[in-house]
Image (tube, grey):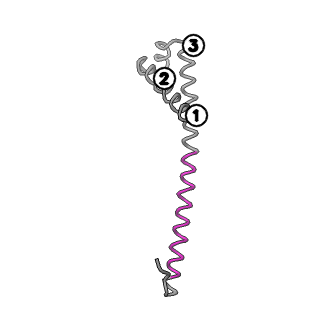
């Protein structure tokens, strides 16, 4: 790509490059915010999973499901899926 010869064209190119740089900076900032939110969500999910496990250990799956207002099979399935997801992420984190 050649350099613009006209002073006006050079000025427009510089302005476009500045705008592009600023837009890219905003994208990177937003991506960082999303990463922080995902980390917080993972931490919240882990806390929820541990609280549900504790309730199931304390009260049993049937009673825990009643207390949580959910179906026992669904509670067991959700706990199993969450545990599998954690095991998968632990495995990929160490790989």
Image coordinates of residue 71 in percent, x first then y, are 41, 19
Label 1: few (<14), some (14–19) or many (≥20) C-alpha neighbours in 10 Å: few
In the image, residue 68 sits, relative to residue 15, either above or below, namely above
- Say the numbered circle drawn on residue 58: 3
- Residue 6 horizontal/vertical position (percent): 49, 87
**Where are the magenta residues, as a range?**
10-35
**Mark 2 highlights which residue?**
79
In the image, which is nearer the foreground, mark 2 or mark 1? 1
Disc 1 target residue: 94
CB of mark 2 within 8 Å of CB of mark 1?
no
Q: Closer to the N terminus: mark 2 or mark 1?
A: 2
Residue 43 image point, x, y percent: 58, 34
Q: Nearer the viewer, residue 71 or 79?
A: 79
Magenta stretch: helix, strand or loop mostly: helix
Give the residue furthest to the front: 95
Closer to the eye: label 3 or 1: 1
Q: Nearer the viewer, residue 87 or 44?
A: 87
Q: Residue furthest bottom?
A: 6
């Amino acid at each position: 790509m050649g350099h613009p010869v006209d002073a006006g064209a050079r000025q427009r190119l510089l302005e476009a490059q500045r705008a592009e740089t600023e837009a890219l900076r905003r994208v990177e900032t937003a991506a960082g915010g999303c990463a922080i939110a995902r980390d917080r969500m993972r931490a919240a999910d882990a806390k929820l999973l541990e609280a549900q496990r504790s309730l199931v250990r304390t009260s049993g799956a049937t009673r825990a499901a009643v207390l949580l207002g959910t179906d026992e099979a669904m509670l067991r399935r959700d706990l199993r899926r969450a545990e599998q997801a954690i095991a998968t992420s632990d495995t990929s984190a160490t790989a």
